[in-house]
Image (cartoon, helix red, strand yellow):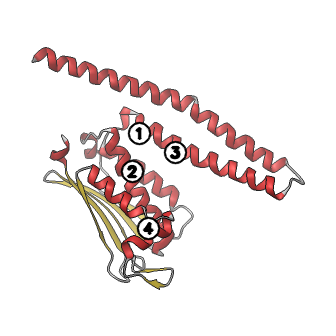
Amino acid sequence: MKKSLELERLKLFEREKVREQIARDYHDEMGHKITEIGLFSELFKRNARGIAAEQKEHLDKVLEASQSLSLDARDFIWALNPEKDSLYEVCLHLQEFSNSLFEEAEVDFHVHGLSEELLRLKLNMEWKRHLTLLFKEGMNNVLRHARCKNAVFEVGVQNGILRMSLIDDGVGLLHVNGHHRPDFSASVFKENRGNGDGLENMKRRAQLLHGYLEINSPEGRGTMIQFSSELTRNGY
């Protein structure tokens, strides 16, 4: 048994070293090349005179795609890095995302509960990926639809239960774009994603983490999205 445990420890160590090396290689190679694509496209756009409207539209799409790919690559590299495998790093990553997202918006955004105690709670890559994408979906909807003045992201662990919440003081999901929406859960995410999959994706991610997603939106009193999960069910 002792030899078996030692072998598992060595396998885990090797996997972490491989992840670390891949993250470093992707950061050095892919990150720089994506940046160059965006830079050269922007320079070409600035210096080009008299190009056809259709060509300018194509160039704008190249710039948009390179910017989107750069963000996706940064998230991918972050998820690969074993040094970021903790609840603290997930919340810090979401805080940085929200700061960038709400920078130009007239929304006062705060994060509560982010402490170094969360470093003790280690998360695997799947947990990191699903948690971040779940709450990024929610934050994007706050920006696009809530028409709120204040928003708060909260995290806490009590008696082995993890709770993460996104709360705003906006119009609520019953009233989007001035219309009464009795089927608010589906309709607001359909507007955001274009196909109605936003809410279902969030619920699916919560289920994959053996958790529960609750969305509470009283009419005219904002919205609360809360994810909760029993950490012991996930091997922590």
Compared to 182, does 202 lie above or below?
Answer: above
Label 2 to label 3, Cα distance in Å?
A: 12 Å
Q: Distance from label 2 to label 4 (Cα)?
A: 17 Å
Looking at the image, tell me whether mark 2 or mark 3 is earlier in sequence order.
3
Q: Which residue is disc 4 drawn over?
A: 189
- Front disc: 1 or 4: 4
Name above or below for residue 39 compared with residue 178. Answer: above
- Circle 2 residue: 132
Residue located beneath label 3 in the image: 72
Task: Residue at 48%, 72% (x, y): give it.
Answer: 145
Disc with the residue nearer the chain's start (1 vs 3): 3
Q: Inspect the image, locate mark 1, and give the three-letter code of the amino acid beneath it.
A: Ala
The location of residue 126, given as percent across then percent down, is 33, 42
- SS for dot 1: helix
> Which residue is at 46% across, 68% downward?
190
Instruction: Please state, as top left, top right, bottom left or bottom right, where the C terminus lies in the image.
Output: top left
51 horizontally vs 183: left or right: right
